[in-house]
Image (spheres, grey):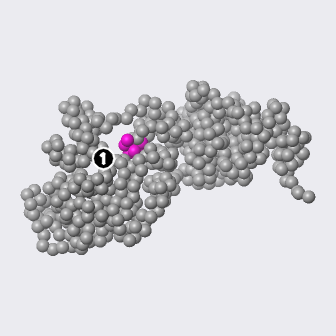
């Protein structure tokens, strides 16, 4: 006879409409299933959840702006703690309506992920038994694992939610973590509860700046943890706010807003504050006779703050061993995996891609993978005057030519010895210099202009361009043999709009720009629908502008009035000067018409290549 587990027997009874067998489910789940039955919900069907208008979501967000600011920062931290586990983190209002989400891309693209969106209401009436709905109804942290969900289609999910309460026990919002995994996620459940507690404590500090805020606990070493009680007290001793651990530690006493410090503790308020300000930690007894240690975390009226820290260590930080760029795009990831082997074989590496796709960043990664002890030396070939190019790369002796440096120069190739020479915008190397560069690549020997001796160097060559060198070879503006030396291993960086890891790029840039700021899924979606002719560089600028508008978090509304300069606009140096702007626009327009060829632009306008280059955002 086949033995059925408790959840199997419960599910069979639920879906047949039979009485639920006792003892097979946690009491809260069994009671929720019964409520869902009473509502007439069919557990075998697919829920048709309600999503309210975005204008209403915006209004709800504004009502809980202080809560949302703290919650988004905690959601970002929570996501970093469980990243890679196919999770979504959601903030809901007190009724279970989702306000914001931060998710792994895989979950966001799933059917469940497309259901957990701002405006969706996760009450039992719409989605059956689920963690958000239960937390909203019961004001307690709750987890719903796998087939404990009422609807069978949610049986692959595990959801954990915790309410965020004010000092009077009213639910201000809900924090939820859900994953595509039926396993019991006790560790994640604990992290969600801790995050909710951190938000509650943060609200006390944020909203009670005029108060003394005191932390207390029976053990002194626990004063800096989330298990410590926090009480906000006015300058005359009235209790204004108390967190949940504080209420529990003072059980049996009138521990509520409106009571007085002297009703809770044996020592008077004045004497306690004097001791705290003079001596740090103070040992006192509450009115029930229990001993506690107390410390002042904020001095009224908000002059000095020592916020509570999360139990178990340091503030949130990102792993400093992580790469400096994102390469989760499948085709890019495969190519990047081969770079190390190419560098180990001393193969010249050629990087192609549009402006702003991160070619120099990739070149520096090649240098790191190569393990070379020498310097990473970069030269922008388009910015070096044509007549000085050879001297810049290979060096010159003292007085070798007019205006030469009086002390001479060893050249960039020698400076890169045992390191990497990065030739950026290699398409702009003048033809005469291409011959000298070809000879150098063949022999790895350098002779300075005006010099008599050659120097052998060991250099990793990395080149990059945003142009098609094969077309230039056909047009006889680039040497074919030089191209074949440079592109022994070629890596193409796709434009931003073609990257499958767009969301990861946005989050990576946010971590670099503002580690303490969060960005919502809705904001990432809005960004993904835009065109990015400037690629990652333009995206970074857009995020910087959004952060200026709201330093704590970024949502889709942060980009409503972002304007992006046209390619024909002037550069930053010329902007605001009408005559300079006109000339700058002409240079940029000619550059675009000349297929982004700096040399051709300079020839058409009768300018030096250096002058052209300084007007371009390269």
x then y, percent, for residue 367: 37, 63
Relative placement, left or right, of 112 versus 69 is right
Residue at left offset 23%, top offset 33%: 581
- Percent x, y of residue 413: 25, 65
Q: Residue at x 83, y 50 (%)?
A: 8
Q: Is residue 288 left or right of residue 465?
A: right
Q: Nearer the viewer, residue 315 or 362?
A: 362
Q: Which residue shows up at 70% across the image and 33% down it?
A: 48
Coordinates of residue 428 in the picture (x, y in percent): 24, 53
Q: Position of residue 590 (x, y in %)?
A: 23, 40
> Which residue is at the front of the view, 138 or 7?
7
In the image: residue 473, left or right of residue 16? left
Identify the secondary structure beneath mark 1. loop
10 Å neighbourhood of mark 1: few (<14), some, or many (≥20)?
Answer: few
Q: Is residue 559 visible?
A: yes
Report the span colored magenta: 533-540
- For the image, the number of numbered tags is 1
**441 displayed left or right of 69:** left
Q: Residue beneath label 1, please?
A: 618
Residue under the image location 42 percent in, 64 percent down = 339
Q: Provide the major secondary structure of the magenta segment.
A: helix
- Whether 556 is among the magenta residues is no
Please say whether residue 134 is visible from this viewpoint: no
In the image, residue 536 lies in the stretch drawn in magenta: yes
Q: If the image is split into quadrants, where does the N terminus sit?
A: bottom right
Residue 390 against residue 65 in the figure, above or below: below
């Amino acid at each position: 006879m086949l033995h059925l587990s408790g959840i199997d027997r419960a599910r069979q009874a639920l879906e047949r409409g039979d009485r639920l067998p006792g003892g097979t489910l946690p009491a809260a789940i069994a009671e929720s299933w019964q409520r869902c039955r009473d509502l007439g919900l069919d557990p075998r069907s697919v829920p048709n959840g309600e999503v309210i208008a975005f204008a209403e979501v915006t209004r709800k967000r504004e009502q809980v702006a202080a809560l949302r600011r703290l919650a988004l920062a905690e959601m970002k931290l929570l996501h970093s703690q469980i990243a890679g586990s196919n999770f979504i983190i959601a903030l809901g209002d007190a009724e279970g309506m989702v306000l914001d989400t931060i998710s792994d891309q895989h979950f966001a693209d799933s059917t469940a992920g497309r259901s957990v969106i701002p405006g969706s209401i996760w009450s039992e009436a719409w989605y059956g038994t689920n963690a958000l709905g239960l937390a909203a109804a019961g004001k307690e942290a709750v987890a719903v694992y796998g087939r404990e969900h009422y609807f069978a289609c949610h049986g692959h999910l595990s959801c954990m939610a915790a309410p965020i309460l004010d000092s009077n026990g009213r639910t201000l919002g809900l924090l939820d973590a859900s994953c595509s995994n039926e396993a019991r996620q006790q560790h994640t459940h604990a992290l969600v509860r801790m995050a909710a507690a951190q938000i509650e404590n943060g609200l006390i500090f944020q909203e009670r700046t005029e108060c003394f805020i005191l932390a207390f606990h029976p053990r002194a070493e626990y004063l800096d943890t989330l298990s410590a009680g926090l009480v906000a007290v006015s300058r005359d001793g009235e209790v204004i706010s108390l967190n949940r651990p504080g209420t529990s530690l003072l059980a049996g006493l009138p521990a509520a807003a409106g009571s007085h410090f002297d009703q809770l503790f044996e020592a008077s308020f004045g004497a306690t504050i004097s001791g705290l300000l003079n001596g740090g930690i103070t040992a006192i007894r509450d009115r029930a006779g229990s001993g506690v240690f107390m410390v002042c975390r904020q001095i009224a009226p908000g002059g000095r703050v020592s916020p509570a820290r999360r139990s178990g260590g340091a503030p949130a930080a990102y792993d400093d061993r992580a790469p400096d760029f994102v390469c989760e795009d499948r085709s890019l990831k495969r190519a990047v995996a081969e770079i190390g082997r190419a560098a180990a074989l001393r193969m010249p590496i050629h990087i192609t891609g549009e402006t702003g796709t991160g070619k120099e960043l990739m070149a520096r990664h090649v240098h790191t993978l190569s393990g070379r002890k020498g310097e990473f030396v970069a030269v922008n070939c388009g910015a070096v005057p044509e007549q000085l190019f050879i001297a810049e790369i290979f060096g010159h002796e003292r007085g070798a030519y007019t205006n030469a440096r009086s002390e001479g120069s060893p050249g960039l190739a020698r400076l890169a010895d045992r390191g990497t020479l990065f030739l950026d915008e290699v398409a702009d190397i003048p033809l005469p210099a291409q011959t000298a560069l070809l000879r150098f690549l063949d022999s790895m020997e350098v002779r300075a202009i005006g010099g008599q001796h050659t120097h052998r160097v060991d250099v990793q060559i990395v080149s990059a361009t945003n142009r098609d060198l094969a077309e230039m070879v056909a047009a006889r503006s680039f040497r074919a043999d030089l191209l074949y030396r440079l592109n022994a291993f070629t890596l193409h960086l796709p434009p931003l709009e073609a990257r499958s890891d767009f969301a990861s790029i946005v989050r990576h840039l946010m971590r670099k720009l503002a580690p303490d700021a969060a960005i919502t899924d809705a904001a990432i979606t809005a960004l993904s629908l835009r065109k990015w002719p400037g690629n990652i560089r333009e995206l970074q600028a857009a995020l910087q502008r959004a952060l200026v508008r709201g330093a704590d978090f970024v949502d889709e509304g942060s980009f409503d009035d972002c304007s992006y300069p046209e390619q024909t606009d002037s550069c930053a140096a010329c902007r605001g000067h009408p005559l300079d702007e006109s000339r700058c626009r002409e240079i940029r327009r000619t550059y675009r018409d000349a297929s982004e060829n700096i040399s051709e632009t300079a020839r058409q306008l009768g300018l030096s290549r250096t002058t052209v280059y300084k007007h371009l955002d390269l």
